[in-house]
Image (cartoon, helix red, strand yellow):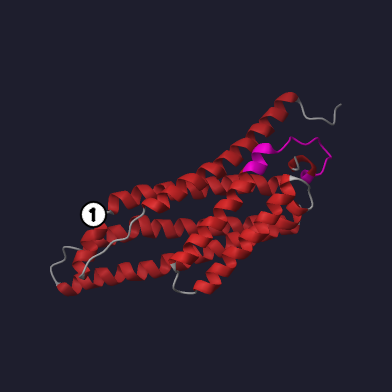
């Protein structure tokens, strides 16, 4: 009997797993809504474009605050998943490292898109000379290049993490094994979409990435919510498989 967790410890662990799963699910839902609400700036001149950015700056700030919160929710949720898969496994630990670095890259991209670009637009939109306005416009364009590269880096790292976790997931049964299959397919699709799109991310590639990540996120969320609390000495996959 001394090998079994106490009722209080078991409830605490179960609540932690559920919280992680719900965090991933909530982050997926709210970030998807945020992406749908994020409209681009437009204008037929550099100054008009910068003024458009200022006009939508408030909306972009809210949208990207939600996106940042979602990234933090993912970091919490998938760190919990990696712990359950056993961080003593090299692939699981490597996957977690890649995933968290991907989260950092995505936070950088959202910071640029939601705040820095708008601040640059506000600083240069009413500049006294056309040359200064053009300079501000160019800075925003350069920022777009950086944020796109950061987003691609994040997607690649997170896809590699998903693939790295797949063997541990596939070692289980039931929903755990199904989640492993989803992870392999999702990671492969994201990598293929990023490689195919190259430097020019198309809407089709972006939607493919969002869909693939959403399916994987929700599968992992369900796995964590359904997970049983393991007894000491029982393999992690035995606790996750339900």
Rendered location of residue 32, percent (x, y): 46, 50
- Left or right of residue 209: residue 238: right
Q: Is residue 227 above or below residue 206?
A: above
The residue positioned 21% from the left and 69% from the top of the image is 44
Rendered location of residue 142, percent (x, y): 35, 71
| Residue 23 in view here | yes
Q: Is residue 98 above or below residue 146?
A: above
User: Closer to the camera, 237 or 130?
Assistant: 237
Q: Tell me the quarter of the image containing the N terminus.
A: top right
Q: Quadrant of residue 157?
A: bottom right
Q: Is residue 66 above or below residue 155?
A: above
Q: Residue furthest left?
A: 128
Q: Which residue is mark 1?
A: 55
Check if residue 226 falls in the magenta segment. Answer: yes
Q: Quadrant of residue 51?
A: bottom left
The residue positioned 29% from the left and 49% from the top of the image is 58
Check if residue 110 falls in the magenta segment. Answer: no
- Over which residues does the magenta segment extend? 222-237
Q: Tell me the quarter of the image containing the C terminus.
A: top right
The residue positioned 24% from the left and 72% from the top of the image is 135
- Left or right of residue 8: residue 18: left
Rendered location of residue 69, percent (x, y): 46, 46
Q: Quadrant of residue 112?
A: bottom left
Q: Residue furthest front?
A: 204
Label 1 CA crowd tier, 10 Å (few <14, some 14–19, many 20+): some
The residue positioned 56% from the left and 45% from the top of the image is 24
Q: Secondary structure at mark 1?
A: helix
Rendered location of residue 28, percent (x, y): 51, 47
| Residue 161 in view here | no
Q: Is residue 75 above or below residue 113?
A: above
């Amino acid at each position: 009997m001394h090998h079994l967790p106490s009722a209080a410890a078991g409830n605490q662990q179960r609540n932690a797993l559920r919280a992680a799963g719900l965090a991933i699910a909530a982050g997926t839902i709210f970030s998807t809504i945020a992406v749908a609400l994020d409209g681009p700036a437009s204008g037929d001149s550099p100054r008009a474009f910068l003024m458009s950015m200022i006009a939508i700056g408030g909306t972009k700030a809210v949208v990207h605050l939600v996106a940042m919160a979602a990234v933090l929710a993912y970091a919490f949720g998938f760190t919990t998943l990696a712990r359950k898969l056993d961080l003593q496994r090299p692939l699981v630990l490597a996957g977690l490292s890649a995933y968290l670095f991907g989260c950092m890259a995505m936070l950088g991209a959202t910071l640029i898109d939601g705040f820095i670009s708008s601040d640059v637009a506000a600083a240069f939109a009413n500049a006294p000379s056309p040359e200064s306005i053009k300079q501000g416009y160019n800075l925003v364009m350069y920022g777009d290049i950086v944020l796109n590269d950061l987003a691609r880096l994040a997607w690649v790292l997170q896809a590699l993490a998903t693939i790295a976790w797949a063997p541990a997931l596939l070692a289980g049964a039931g929903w755990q094994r199904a989640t492993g299959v989803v992870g392999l397919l999702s990671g492969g699709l994201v990598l293929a979409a990023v490689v195919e799109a190259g430097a020019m991310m198309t809407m089709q590639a972006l939607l493919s990435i969002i869909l693939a990540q959403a399916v994987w996120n929700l599968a992992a969320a369900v796995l964590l919510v359904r997970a049983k609390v393991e007894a000491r000495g029982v393999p992690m996959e035995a606790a996750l498989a339900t």
